[in-house]
Amino acid sequence: MSSTSALARESWLRAKLWGTIFGVFSRGITTYDASGQPKPLSQKITLPDGPLIVVANHSSHADSVALVAAIGRVRPVLVVSAKDYWKQDATAEWLSAGLVGTWPISRDGHGYDDLAAVRPKVEAGAVLVVFAEGTRSVDGKLQEFHSGAFRLAADLGARVLPVGIVGAFAALPKGATWPKRLPYNLRFGVPIDVPSAEPIHTDAAAAQARAQLSEMLEQPVEDNPQFGWSRVRRLAFGWVGLAVIFFWAFGEGVFWPLIAEMPLMLLIVTVGWRWRGLLLTVVACIGSALGVLATWWLVDHGFNPPSPLTTPLMFEIARDQLTSNPDTAFWRQMFNGIPVKVYAHEAGALHLSLDQVLLALIPRMLRIAIIGVGTWMLGSALSRWLKSCLGMVQGICLALFPFGLWLTVGYWS
Amino acid sequence: MNEKPKSRSRATELVGRWAFRIAAFEFGFVVLQAMTFGYGWLGADPVIPAAFLVITDALMLSLTALLTVIAIAAQLASRSVMWHPIAALTLVVAAVIVAFNCFQGVFGD
């Protein structure tokens, strides 16, 4: 039991690892249930209960890991592999056993004995993936099936689930060194019962599986955006996104400790070559400008808004710069990491005129515009890549942001 | 002459070659940063770009070092070592030294 839970844990970790790798090096994996309903990889698939053997077409090295990425999230999974190929040297063995979770079998005529040895794991709940064709197809077409998977299903009382892998051949065919960045579709079929290991039953099951797979492989590859992209894009095109950007930028000019460009960058990467990108940037500029003006006016009239995550040295430097040359002070703020609210505060404390503060807003809005438009263009250029991994990229950026903030505050302490 | 030894798989060779290519890129990138901050091309207090590059370098150099160590271990296990991962390791170490000196100049006392 403990070995099964260990395998379940390993399979889950492998699924996350390969899901991440597919997010970067492909346009993502979409799974389809038997009714044809699509789901991005981040949403769990539903598998039949009980012992299960997945029979899939095989035309690429990406097949195994795509199945591990999808199935390993819900059940422990083992992939049958060729012992002579994947035990060539230490790297190949480590890759196959450690990173994929393979069950190696020999191709010298004793393969079924190796296959049958997996029985306890399948009975304990592991899903066994078998490529019934025995080797990768060189032209992407379905080859003849071997009977081992169907005999094993009969011996174990397991059901056979056909899964069509569409897109892997185009992305990484046999002999290719580097994968093309294309979408992958995993089409799950209807489970097949194999009543006995008699050839008449195994042949019938193989024919049914083959028929289902043939039908699945005729489907065109669909390029669906993944979960994170869809959600962020919806937000970017709605009123809520505009409001978040405006109030964040306004708040940053008054008291909010996180930079105005943060939500702008998070949303603008998804809008593509649409005018919405310009609107989001303009809203952030206006919000920030109003925030700076509000702080200047409040301090000028004797109110001091709170300034979290600032240091006395920041105020001192800002005051020095505004005193010596108010025209260039805000230009120096663009790169130096002192929050704009500190400059706005000191502008109010020094009772600078409205004209001086309005002029000072130019570099402020210019920085937001440069970062906003830059991210907009970058996001549009990389949209095919980001569609599959936006959530991961933004998650990493958000996780690292506090470290950058710590460096900046530390510099001015 | 260029025939690969039988003990070394294609995967082992690929990992070694890519470790070198990535390490060479990393080294060039770090040298460019050292020049940018050393010559003050971004002004007197370039805190935001420097903080961003500290994070980027820490991530990329760690991953490159990991890839290089894996490449060397894989080739040692195959008893057939190419020059690529050795050069990659040298470049990663050099890049770490250059980056450390560069950011010490920005964030140090």
Image (cartoon, coloured by chain):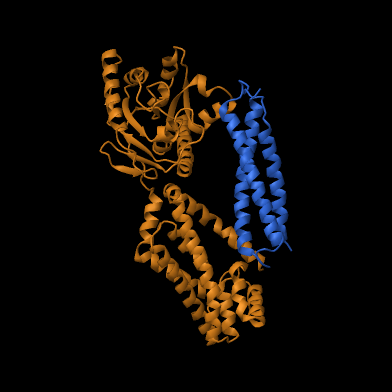
Chain colours: A orange, B blue
Question: Measured from the top left, where is residue A197 in percent x and y?
Answer: 31, 15
The foreground one among A68 and A134 is A134
The foreground one among A382 and A338 is A382
Residue B17, by quadrant, is: top right
Residue A186 sits above or below residue A331 on the image: above
**Residue A100 visible in the shown view:** yes
Give the residue furthest to the top.
Answer: A109
Give the residue furthest to the front.
Answer: B1
Q: Report the residue at 66% width, 67% height from top.
A: B43
Horizontal side of A312 relative to A29 (left or right) equals right
Residue B55 sits above or below residue A139 on the image: below
Question: Measured from the top left, where is residue A298 in percent x and y?
Answer: 51, 83
The foreground one among A20 and A181 is A181
**Residue A255 visible in the shown view:** no
Question: Measured from the top left, where is residue A412 in percent x and y?
Answer: 66, 68
Horizontal side of A384 relative to B82 (left or right) equals left
Q: Quadrant of the N terminus of chain A?
A: top left
Residue B19, by quadrant, is: top right
Q: Quadrant of the C terminus of chain A?
A: bottom right
Residue A146 sits above or below residue A281 on the image: above
Q: Report the residue at 37% width, 53% height from top.
A: A230
The image shows a total of numbered marks equal to 0
Residue A337, by quadrant, is: bottom right
Question: Measured from the top left, where is residue A268 in percent x and y?
Answer: 44, 60
